[in-house]
């Protein structure tokens, strides 16, 4: 179990994470979601002691990460797949990690097989694609067979088969009773993987609930209506507080009114309907609505909040990250002191 309590991280004037409190339970895949720059990586790094909180803290199975002597045997993490020594082979990288953490050498071949990299075990990591590096990072996280696992954007760069494989792996790890926290900025990556969600925006908690509860919020749900009297019905529905989009011809898409209410209003006005079809919100839509206004950057426009930010961070970790991000530590080996 991971317990995050009042976790806060400030970088000068920038508050990356603000008073974040949530719990990640064993036996589930918990999706850690938020738009770019929401503070996911910073939070994960604080959980494993690589960033020092400004306030608050996090425990893993009751103790801060630093007090876990078992290291990789207790907690495995993929934090930055690019953060590996390119001159080493995959096998050598994992062997060094195993040796440094007192793990048996046989684990190296076991995890290489698990992630499907046996065939390239003796190739230098420098020539690996991002997807292969992600697999290697996942292998490193699994090396100590730990009960607690954290993965930061693990499916970035994986091909569709790789994404399906990773989903299955996370679910299996959770089914084995492990605590599995997986971050993503895309709801679509989580909806077939996670059964619980922690959603953050601009460093603050927005939602902590089951995927089912999230889906039931109904945000973004709409009703498709077809009628020969589209203009008249649109006016009636707008008066009732619905928001109506004319889709051309006899079709309208209505939000803010239930299908039952639309049917009732049409009946009262003797407007004939040829279709009345509720459409559930996609989870992606619900996520977008929930985090609207909490994303630092959206296509084409920048919000005015976080005025001190460098535009470069829209692409991830381009600028302003020197203080904490460049720790030079390897994925899967969250050890050493925090900055
Ligand atoms: N070392 C740092 N120095 C200054 N600001 C930082 C540093 N690390 C992160 N930030 C800022 O903190 C905020 C949260 O960044 P973080 O990388 O944790 O977000 P994220 O949710 O992981 O985003 P992404 O999906 O883009 O990786 C951003 O505004 C970022 O610019």
Image: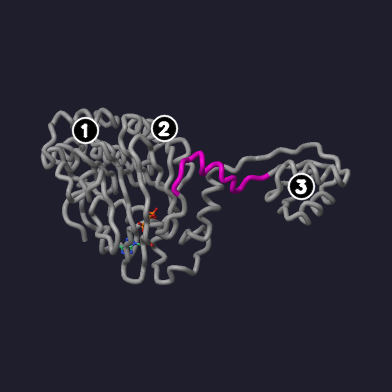
Which circle's residue, 1 or 3, is located before the other in the chain? Answer: 1
Look at the numbered disc 2 and give the secondary structure of its residue. helix
Quadrant housing the C terminus: bottom left
Dot 3 or dot 2, earlier in sequence = 2
Q: Which mark is residue 248?
A: 3
Q: CA distance from mark 1 to mark 2?
A: 22 Å
Q: Nearer the viewer, residue 280 or 295?
A: 280
Label 1: state its secondary structure: loop
- Apparent side of residue 180 relative to residue 35 in the rendered image (left or right): left
Assign a secondary structure to mark 3. loop
Image-quadrant location for residue 267: top right
Residue on which the image places disc 2: 164
Per the image, the residue denoted by label 1 is 121
- Spatial separation of the CA atoms under disc 3 and disc 2: 38 Å
Give how far across and how far down residue 202 sits, in percent: 43, 60
Residue 160 percent across, percent down from the top left? 43, 35
Q: Nearer the viewer, residue 188 or 198?
A: 198
Q: Is residue 174 left or right of residue 246?
A: left
Residue 219, magenta (yes or no): yes
Q: Residue at x 28, y 52 (%)?
A: 58
The image quarter in which residue 7 lies? bottom left
Which residue is pictured at 33% across the width and 61% down the height? 8
**Quadrant, the N terminus:** top left
Q: How is the image coloured?
A: one colour
For the residue pair 166 and 24, the one nearer the viewer reads as 24
Report, in whole angstroms, how far the alpha carbon at label 1 lies from the one at label 3.
57 Å
The furthest residue to the right? 270
The region drawn magenta spans: 208-222
- The residue lying furthest to the front in this view is 62
Tell me which numbered mark, 1 or 2, is placed earlier along the sequence: 1
Circle 1 Cα neighbour tier, 10 Å, few/some/many (<14 / 14–19 / ≥20): many
Residue 281 vertical placement versus 296 (above, below): above
């Amino acid at each position: 179990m991971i317990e995050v309590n009042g976790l806060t991280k400030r970088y000068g004037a920038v508050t990356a994470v603000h008073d974040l409190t949530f719990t990640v339970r064993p036996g589930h895949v918990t999706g850690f979601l938020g738009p770019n720059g929401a503070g996911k990586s910073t939070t994960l790094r604080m959980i494993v002691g690589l960033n020092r909180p400004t306030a608050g803290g996090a425990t893993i199975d009751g103790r801060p990460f630093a007090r876990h002597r078992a290291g990789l045997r207790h907690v495995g993490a993929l934090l930055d797949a690019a953060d590996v020594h390119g001159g080493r082979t995959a096998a050598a990288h994992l062997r060094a990690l195993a040796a440094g953490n007192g793990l048996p050498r046989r684990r190296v071949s076991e995890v290489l097989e698990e992630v499907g990299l046996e065939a390239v075990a003796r190739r230098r990591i420098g020539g690996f694609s991002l997807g292969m590096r992600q697999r290697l990072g996942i292998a490193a996280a699994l090396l100590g067979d730990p009960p607690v696992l954290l993965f930061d954007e693990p499916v970035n760069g994986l091909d569709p088969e790789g994404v399906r494989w990773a989903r299955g792996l996370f679910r299996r790890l959770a089914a084995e009773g492990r605590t599995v926290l997986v971050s993503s900025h895309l709801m679509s990556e989580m909806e077939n993987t996670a059964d619980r969600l922690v959603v953050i925006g601009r460093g603050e908690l927005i939602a902590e609930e089951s995927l089912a509860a999230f889906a039931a919020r109904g945000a973004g749900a709409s009703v498709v209506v077809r009628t020969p009297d589209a203009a008249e019905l649109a006016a009636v529905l707008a008066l009732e507080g619905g928001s109506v989009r004319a889709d051309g011809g006899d079709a309208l898409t209505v939000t803010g009114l239930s299908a039952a209410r639309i049917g009732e209003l049409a009946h009262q006005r003797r407007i004939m309907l040829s279709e009345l079809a509720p459409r559930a919100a996609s989870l992606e839509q619900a996520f977008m609505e929930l985090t609207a206004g909490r994303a630092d950057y959206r296509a084409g426009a920048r919000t005015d909040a976080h005025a001190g930010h460098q535009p470069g961070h829209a692409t991830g970790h381009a600028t302003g990250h020197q203080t904490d991000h460049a720790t030079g530590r390897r994925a899967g080996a969250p050890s050493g002191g925090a900055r």
